[in-house]
Amino acid sequence: MQFSSDLERQLNGYGLTTAHILYRIPDFEAVLQTFVWQDYDLAPDFPEMHKFLDFWQTRLDGPLHSVRFTHQRLIGPNEWRRIDGEFRLQ
């Protein structure tokens, strides 16, 4: 499903997902490097994060060591409401 804006994604249940990825450097496998990925994603299946990790494993050389992630919905259905009103200043 294609969304036209970040606000529209949030209203459709998407939240901000941040993944902290540790991976091994291809030439020095004893050394771990870190990468932070962030995007709007849909819990609990996280299709966007899984798509990115699948891309990583098929296209990039650095093998994954571990992935930690957090997810936070920024706008919930009960937090969004229409308000009628107008403020006039001078």
Image (tube, helix red, strand yellow):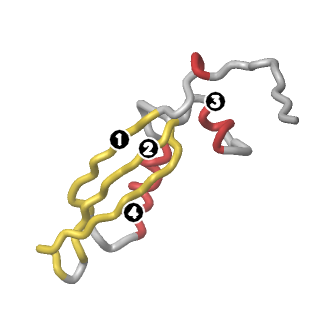
Tell whether 69 sits left or right of 50: left
Rendered image: mark on residue 17: 2
Three-letter code, disc 4:
Trp
Mark closer to the chain start, 2 or 1:
2
Location of mark 4 (residue): 56
Q: What residue is drawn where x is 69% and y is 43%?
A: 2
Q: Within 10 Å of the Cα at label 2, are there few (<14), some (14-19), or many (20+) other Cα atoms? A: many
Instruction: Give the answer, above or below, for where 3 lies relative to 79.
Output: below
Q: CA distance from mark 3 to mark 1?
A: 19 Å
The furthest residue to the front: 90
Q: Position of residue 44 (x, y in %)?
A: 41, 30
Q: Nearer the viewer, residue 10 or 62?
A: 10
Rendered image: mark on residue 11: 3
Location of the N terminus (image quadrant): top right
Q: Position of residue 58 (x, y in %)?
A: 39, 64
Mark closer to the chain start, 2 or 3:
3
Q: Position of residue 66 (x, y in %)?
A: 23, 54
Three-letter code, disc 3:
Leu
